[in-house]
Image: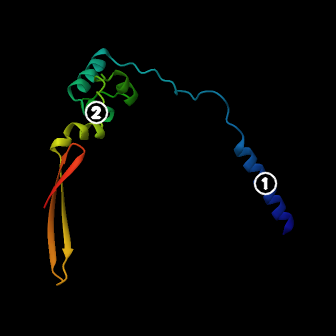
Amino acid sequence: MEQNYVEWNAGRRRRRRRRRRPCKGGVPAGAFRITVIHCYSEALIATMSRDNRLWGTERIRGELLKLGIEVNGRSIRRYRSRGPARSPSQTWRTFLRNHARHLWAVDLLTLPTLTFKTLYVLVFMLTIGASWCMST
């Protein structure tokens, strides 16, 4: 029994060692296929991305497949026209500084009274510069 286990374990180690060997070097055949895209496909990709700014690569690829044109997603990213860079949006601090005179804050409070009734309080707060005006 022990002899069989020892042989079995040695064979298992041999098989594991064989699996861990590095693969042969080199690039597999067909890994770097050069895809030729016709000029009209390039123009179509650029036109579709320019006319439909919200369409991404996969949407354009799907529309081209409907037309019977098979194009790789990477090729679409290459020929897609990029729009102008968006200007940075206003920060929250700048927004508050610009609109502080026109900001209102509203709060609704519920207060239990001594007679166990609920009192509802609606509070409006208007900002004036750095100070607050309260009215109820």
The image quarter in which residue 95 lies: top left
Which residue is the site of mark 1?
11
Residue farthest right in this picture: 3
Residue at the image point whose x is 52% and y is 28% from the top: 31
User: Toward the viewer: 131 or 70?
Assistant: 131
Q: Is residue 12 left or right of residue 103?
A: right
Which of marks 2 and 1 precedes in the sequence?
Answer: 1
**105 vs 44, nearest the viewer:** 105
Secondary structure under tag 2 reads: loop
Q: What residue type is labelled 1?
A: Gly
Q: In this view, does 9 lie to the left or right of 51?
A: right
Q: Give 112 or 41, whichever is nearer the viewer.
A: 112
User: Is the C terminus in the top left, top right, bottom left or bottom right quadrant?
Assistant: bottom left
Residue 102 as seen in the image, left or right of residue 61? left
Who is closer to the viewer here, 90 or 14? 90
**Dot 1, crowdedness within 10 Å: few (<14), some or many (≥20)?**
few
**Quadrant of the image containing the N terminus:** bottom right
Residue 56, compared with residue 3, is above or below; it is above
Q: Where is residue 48 in the image (x, y as percent from the top left)?
A: 24, 26
Q: Residue at x 29, y 27 (%)?
A: 87
Task: Measuring from the top left, give residue 56's x and y in whole percent.
Answer: 30, 33
Residue 129: x %, y % from top left: 21, 42
Residue that mark 2 sits on: 89
Q: Residue 27 carries which label?
A: none
Element marked by disc 1:
helix
Question: Which residue occupies 39% across, 18% down?
Answer: 36
Number of numbered discs visible in the structure rendering: 2
Q: In x, y percent, where is residue 5?
A: 81, 64
Q: In this rendering, is residue 136 above or below 72? A: below
